[in-house]
């Protein structure tokens, strides 16, 4: 199954936007404030439309989305939030999902605190993973306080802890085992979970507490753990906000290779990035069978617009390319002086 399209109206920075997605890798680029992370959270809420007993008992997409924004009331999320002249307008979120030779439509409409949700025959929610920019494994145990003390945390931060802090599975497919082996070579070991803490276990048996592990390796260690617990598998949706954060550029090619392997294993991905190296390596290493769509978000006055392309260099409103050109001009100017 795959998410084919979403339509969003009157939500945060979006007046109205409709985007078609690739069944493989979707990459969002754009300046800060253009809604990239907001789109990722919308997609997460759509995928996880059924209730998670570890987090909540409300199946509403609206409620799930609200918890991605630390329980902000919808009047603060509608049409750019507090102070907006249209703050009482309805929020509309629609999505089109393909699977089993059918297309389903999930939609949610909220106004004045009332919600409606429909799945039109879709029986299962997607196995979805949201990896935030902030490294979370060193904060293992926070998910327990979230439940017991009703902490007003972004639910995506808690969800990733719930999905890593469980027992490992025995039946891992050949494709995913191959990715595990690649990840193990990168981090020089494997990830273990003991006494509510995460460690990197070196080949000689030495345990390195995750709090003392290199930040870049923690990224790969998280993927390792998600595969090992069975949450990252064929049919999953992987949403990753700024996968390049804390990564040295020398590790970006390894990350890109793993992303392509995950796509080959049947995982649809949504990435938001500010990193020129990441998108260029994706473009350079892409093969004919790889499915990638680039989505550039940009501001036009008070509105946020978007454009999509199968080729990164064909995006017209691309802040990464535009800023690299500006840097080149400045460098040439300095040399000429």
Image (spheres, helix red, strand yellow):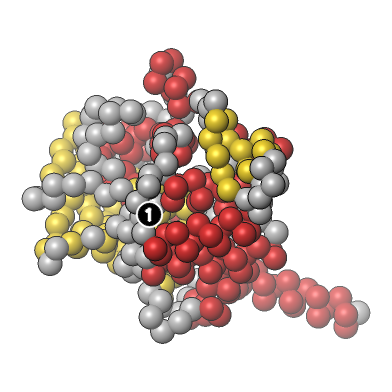
Q: Is residue 309 above or below residue 186?
A: below
- State the residue in front, 55 or 174: 174
Q: Is residue 269 above or below residue 218?
A: below
Q: Residue furthest front?
A: 204
Q: Residues within 10 Å of mark 1 (few under 14, many from 20)?
A: some
Q: Percent x, y for residue 126?
A: 27, 49
- Residue that appears at 16% across and 41% down: 117
Q: Is residue 20 left or right of residue 298?
A: left
Which residue is the site of mark 1?
172
Q: Is residue 146 left or right of residue 189?
A: left
Q: Percent x, y for residue 255?
A: 56, 63
- Residue that appears at 49% across and 45% down: 225
- Residue that appears at 53% across and 60% down: 181
Q: Is residue 78 above or below residue 104?
A: above
- State the residue in front, 227 or 103: 227
Q: Percent x, y for residue 121?
A: 8, 50
The answer to whether residue 292 of the structure is visible from this angle is: yes
- State the residue in front, 327 or 49: 49
The answer to whether residue 119 of the structure is visible from this angle is: no
């Amino acid at each position: 199954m795959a998410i084919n399209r979403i339509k969003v109206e009157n939500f945060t920075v979006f007046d109205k936007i409709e985007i078609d997605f690739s069944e493989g890798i979707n990459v969002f680029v754009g300046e800060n404030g253009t809604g990239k992370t907001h789109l990722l959270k919308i997609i997460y809420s759509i995928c996880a439309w059924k209730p998670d007993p570890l987090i909540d008992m409300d199946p509403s997409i609206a409620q799930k989305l609200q918890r991605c924004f630390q329980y902000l009331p919808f009047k603060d999320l509608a049409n750019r939030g507090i102070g907006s002249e249209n703050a009482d307008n309805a929020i509309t979120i629609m999505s089109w999902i393909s699977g089993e030779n059918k297309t389903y439509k999930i939609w949610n409409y909220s106004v004045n605190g009332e919600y409606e949700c429909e799945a039109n025959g879709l029986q299962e929610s997607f196995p979805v993973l949201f990896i935030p920019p902030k490294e979370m494994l060193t904060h293992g145990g926070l998910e327990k306080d979230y439940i017991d003390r009703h902490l007003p945390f972004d639910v995506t931060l808690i969800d990733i802890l719930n999905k890593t802090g469980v027992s490992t599975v025995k039946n891992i497919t050949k494709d995913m085992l191959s990715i595990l082996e690649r990840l193990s070579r990168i981090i020089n070991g494997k990830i273990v979970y003991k006494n509510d803490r995460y460690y990197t276990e070196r080949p000689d048996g030495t345990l390195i507490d995750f709090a003392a592990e290199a930040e870049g390796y923690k990224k790969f260690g998280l993927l390792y753990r998600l595969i090992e617990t069975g949450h990252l598998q064929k049919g999953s949706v992987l949403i990753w906000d700024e996968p390049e954060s804390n990564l040295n550029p020398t590790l970006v090619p390894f990350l890109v290779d793993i992303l392509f392997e995950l796509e080959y294993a049947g995982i649809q991905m949504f990435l938001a990035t500010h990193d020129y190296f990441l998108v260029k390596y994706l473009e350079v290493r892409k093969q004919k069978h790889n499915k990638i769509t680039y989505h550039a978000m940009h501001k036009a006055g008070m509105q946020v617009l978007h454009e999509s392309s199968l080729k990164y260099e064909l995006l017209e409103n691309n802040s990464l390319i535009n800023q690299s050109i500006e840097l080149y001009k400045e460098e040439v100017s300095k040399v000429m002086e």
